[in-house]
Image (cartoon, rainbow, N blue to C red):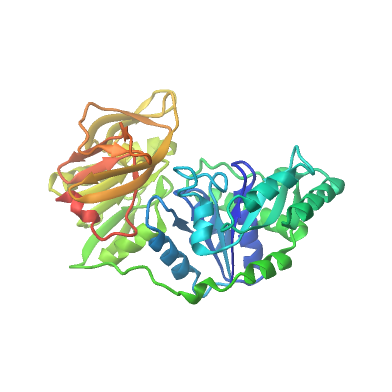
Amino acid sequence: MAGFLIAAPNSGSGKTTVASGLLRAFKNRGYRVQPFKCGPDYIDTKYHDTASGNKSVNLDLFLSSAQHVAELYAKYSLGKDVCIAEGAMGLFDGYDGMQGSCAETAKLLKIPVVLVVNAKSAAYSVAPLLYGFRHFDAEVNVAGAIFNFVGSESHCRFLNQACIDAGVKLFGCLPKNAGLEIPSRYLGLTLENERLFDEFADRAAAAMEQYIDLDALLAFARTYGDVQAAAAETRPATVGSKIRIAVASDEAFNFTYRENMERLKARGDIAFFSPLRDSRLPEADFVYFPGGYPEMFLEQLCENTELHGDIRAYVAGGGRALAECGGMMYLSSSIADAKGREYPMVGIFSQKASMKNMKLTLGYRSFNYNGFAAKGHEFHYSHCETEATSVAQQYNAAGVPVDTKLLRRKNAIAGYTHIYWGETDNLFDMFN
């Protein structure tokens, strides 16, 4: 098996373009490919899914233990020919210095790093940059480079000389190409948008075939050993009686972690439903409303009042529900668009969500509620107007209290934090 990590000195270098292109190019060659994403991102993974034909898996050393990350990599790489992990931010950027960085993940998994470098305004000066990244940590094997936004063949020759002098292998130079601009990340999973993703993957793969030495990259990655030797399986869930689980899933609600869903599958039978189109809530003992883009479908969500009534009746009867970010907005009294126009929603929580005066809030979160030690990630542009008291204090990665609220009404729990429970069996302790 060939396995490697696509990383960069900083964001904006083109990691997702390169990762998606390589996934599709190797898939087109008939290889069984498996994508991974370092960090909590649930949007890049959708590009991976489309490009590879396999669902991407998040590897995050804040949300879970090192053992869990290693087990996930071994589990999902089993039987695959090529495994490509895409990093987040810069190679050494973690939640606390290098802690939680994709460099730390590469060390843990013992996979080599291919650095994607934005060469738009640099030539031979990339040599000390490459040298520094290669030698900063001896346990991080920065052994190859791909240059992006290259202006000409002569530009590529300067970059090649820089690689030689820095002791880093050059795999190719990608020219400036407007066709390789990633489609808007602010998209729901409509058939039209999936077509755009697919076309983008094809264009990116064609560029990889033309400008990247794929044979050399594959041979290089194979020389670093077979990580499948461990062939570990993630710890099986401890399952009691099976329960009925309903999960909101459509263009508006689709931000889920793969291993979270695997844990739910181990606990019971999952029925998916669409808040956009379904008028009835499936019979359930637990309902999950994941995050997504409800603000893109306000009229449709607002008009589906029959489902609103079903959800209200389910919660009033003591039914357990978890709503995260966009899911929480949906269970609020209303959602206002960017112009301030309000659309009535389900009304479980007496708060108003709004996209007006959008401002980004993001970061890792942790909290403890009813014995459930939760870790998750917050990422949103909306805000909620509420006077409700939080049932748990949340903290950032440094352990500093933040004002992110966790709300509860009867057995419905909601908040902005996307919780990761792929490593635990006690998610339902929250409802005690």
Q: Is residue 108 left or right of residue 419?
A: right
Quarter of the view holding residue 53: bottom right
Residue 408 appears in the figure? yes
Q: Residue furthest right?
A: 154
Q: Position of residue 145 (x, y in %)?
A: 70, 54
Residue shown at 69%/70% (left/top)?
219
Residue nearer the viewer, 275 or 143: 143
Identify whether 300 is placed above or below 211.
above
Identify whether 82 is placed above or below 302.
below
Residue shown at 39%/31% (left/top)?
382
Q: Position of residue 86 (x, y in %)?
A: 56, 54
Quadrant that contains the N terminus = bottom right
Residue shown at 75%/62% (left/top)?
213
Residue nearer the viewer, 10 or 236: 10
Residue 379 appears in the figure? no
Q: Position of residue 280 (x, y in %)?
A: 26, 51
Residue nearer the viewer, 145 or 181: 145
Q: Is residue 353 left or right of residue 151?
A: left
Q: Position of residue 275 (x, y in %)?
A: 34, 47
Residue shown at 57%/71% (left/top)?
32
Residue nearer the viewer, 46 or 246: 46
Q: Is residue 210 left or right of residue 104?
A: right
- Callout count: 0
Identify whether 199 is placed above or below 340.
below
